[in-house]
Image: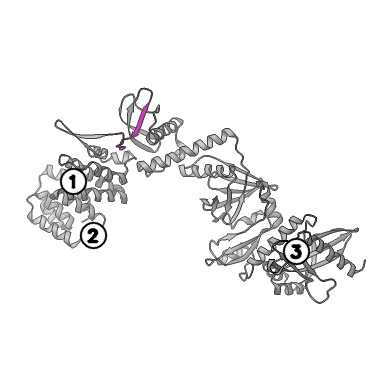
Amino acid sequence: MDKSSIEGNAVDYVRIALRNTNIIKPELKEGDKTLSWDGELFVYNSDEFSKANLKAIIPAQVKGRTLKKYTKTHPIAVSDLINFKKKKNILYFVVQIVNNEYRISYVPLQLYDLEKLLKNAGKRKTISLPLTDLPFKNATKVKSIILSFIKDAERQSQIIPGVFNTGDLQEKIKKPVLTFNVDMRSNFSGADIYSSIITQKPYVYYKDEKGVEFPVDKFENIQNLIIGHHNDIPIFVDEIQYYDGYDILNNETGTTIRIGRQISILLKEHKLTLNYGNAGTVQERLNTLSFILAIHNGSILAFGDFKLPIQTVLLKDDELKRIEKLVKFYKDIVTLFKRLGIQKELNLDDLTKQQTNNLYDFCQSELYDKEVSLGLKNTGQGVLRLNNINIYCFCIKGNKGNKVYSIFNDKYVGYCIIIGDEQIPVSPYVMLADKTTETFEKIDNVNFSDLVPSIKKYGIPDKTEDAHIHLLLKMLLYYDKIKSPNILDACIALATILYEQNKSEINFINLTQTVKRKHKLTKETIQDLVSLKNSTSRIDIKLASCILLESKLECEHYLSELDHSQIEEFQHYPIMNLYSQT
């Protein structure tokens, strides 16, 4: 067979394969000796070949060869690549004929490929192109290849000079945002992911802050998923972000993508296996199990902009129920800690089985008002110890079980101050006024965000003012130890209520010392302190005023006028913490 016949047959074979898609009209010339390309492929949105329905025009070149056996590469002149670059892309077809049978191969050459090939060609006049078999007997697959080519052609209008892989990009840009896409059937499984990346070799794109895309790499194998050992591409399930990135490990078992501390995806022999554990903080466990449930339910998993529904984890009924119960339990813990104002992170990994059961019971009682086995022998106060968390509780003994609440839950727990024969209801937080300062450090369910609203709810009857002042002073001492802003805000709010209700000298001093811990005193407040110091007959008030005015010499003078027992008492007040700073 002469060369012209070989070329003619090759063009015919390619035409048939493309026409079978019903969306491509190939305009290919035969035996053209002048141009680097043979013609163009007119691609339409449907089988209606009209101007209005035209989707894209792709430059194309067809080469025919008779061989003794099929080959995986094809030689091409560098001058042709230079000409192809003028068009920015081209679909290069090679038809190999062996013993009157033929195979169609293709090379999708986008702008990125042409630039990289020319760079690597150096001074050579001819290079070899790697060939990919065209599934020409499957019109659907051919159609998918053409449409993917069009998508990439639309994204590759320009490249970043000198950037041909993610390593080159990293030298220019820190933590770049990368995206890539693969085309897959709608009901694919996890095992298809690996093979699809291997076969399609999608391009990796960098998106700048303006949203402009640049091709920077191409998947030759699954290891291109990473930049170094950690990738900052966020991971979503149904558009909810679960993780900020992932790590990748390579060893003799295969390639493992590690997501968080408990999820790993093993890639080996074109198969994908997902494993998970249940450990870590409450939020880590919630993330892990919610992630697994979402995948079990066929939700969309996305690595950045790369979206794929994977179903590699199909849970058995008993395991599914166990995970759903655990997720509900962990969500209850989050709700419980938020309600109780617990700031510490619960160390779940070291909880005993009994402590875990106790925590479950407490959630059921506090959140859902259910009777539980947890509790004391008799109605009364107690501390629920959960490893590194201590919760001050109140147990109400029932006939069949107990109800156990946070002791500050005034919906179920009442507290009164007894004065003579009178019982005066106040906020349960006022009971802390009778406790030592260390109580704040030993229990974790003092909710400082709820404390003042609770006091406002009950009000401050005159007979209970001293108890509320004692509570304020203990809160200030605790703040001075740990410097937590939310505690200081609660102190300021409580001191303000006390002063507005009774503008006494003590309440003014306490409000002023509380505010001074947050910011400098105003000129007006300083003048009020000077007036108070000069007008009061109480030495302790004069001393407190001088401490707030930062008048050290006067402080020493008034301290000398106090007797030993008065000095000892004064030294236990939080205002002395300010004196040590003057």
Query: Does the CB distance between marks 1 and 3 fall below 8 Å?
Result: no
Q: Are marks 2 and 1 in contact (CB under 8 Å)?
A: no
The image's mark for residue 520 is 2
Figure disc tally: 3
Query: Which label's residue is closer to the chain start, 2 or 1?
Result: 2
Q: Which mark is residue 57?
A: none
Mark 2 nearby-residue class (10 Å; few <14, some 14–19, many ≥20): few
In the image, is residue 502 part of the stretch drawn in magenta?
A: no
Q: Amino acid at mark 1?
A: Gln
Which of these two is toward me, 220 or 298? 298
Q: Residue at x 46, y 31 (%)?
A: 353
Question: Quarter-wise, where is residue 253 in the image?
Answer: top right
Amino acid at circle 2: Lys
The numbered mark, 3 or 2, whose residue comes first in the sequence reads 3
In whole angstroms, how far apart are the C-alphas of marks 3 and 2? 77 Å
State the residue lying farthest toward the right.
1
Circles 3 and 2: CB distance less than 8 Å? no
Picture quadrant of residue 400: top left
Tell me if 308 is positioned left or right of 282 in this view. Answer: right
Nearer the observer, disc 3 or disc 2?
3
Q: Amino acid at mark 3?
A: Ile
Q: Horizontally, is 424 left or right of 403 in the view?
A: left
Looking at the picture, how far across and down is residue 494, in whole percent? Answer: 23, 47
Q: Is residue 74 shown above or below 350? A: below
Q: CA distance from mark 1 to mark 3?
A: 91 Å
Q: Quadrant of the N terminus?
A: bottom right
Which residue is under mark 3? Answer: 24
Q: Residue at x 76, y 68 (%)?
A: 60
Q: Earlier in the sequence, mark 1 or mark 3?
A: 3
Q: Quadrant of the C terminus?
A: bottom left
| Segment colored magenta | 399-412
The disc placed on residue 571 is 1
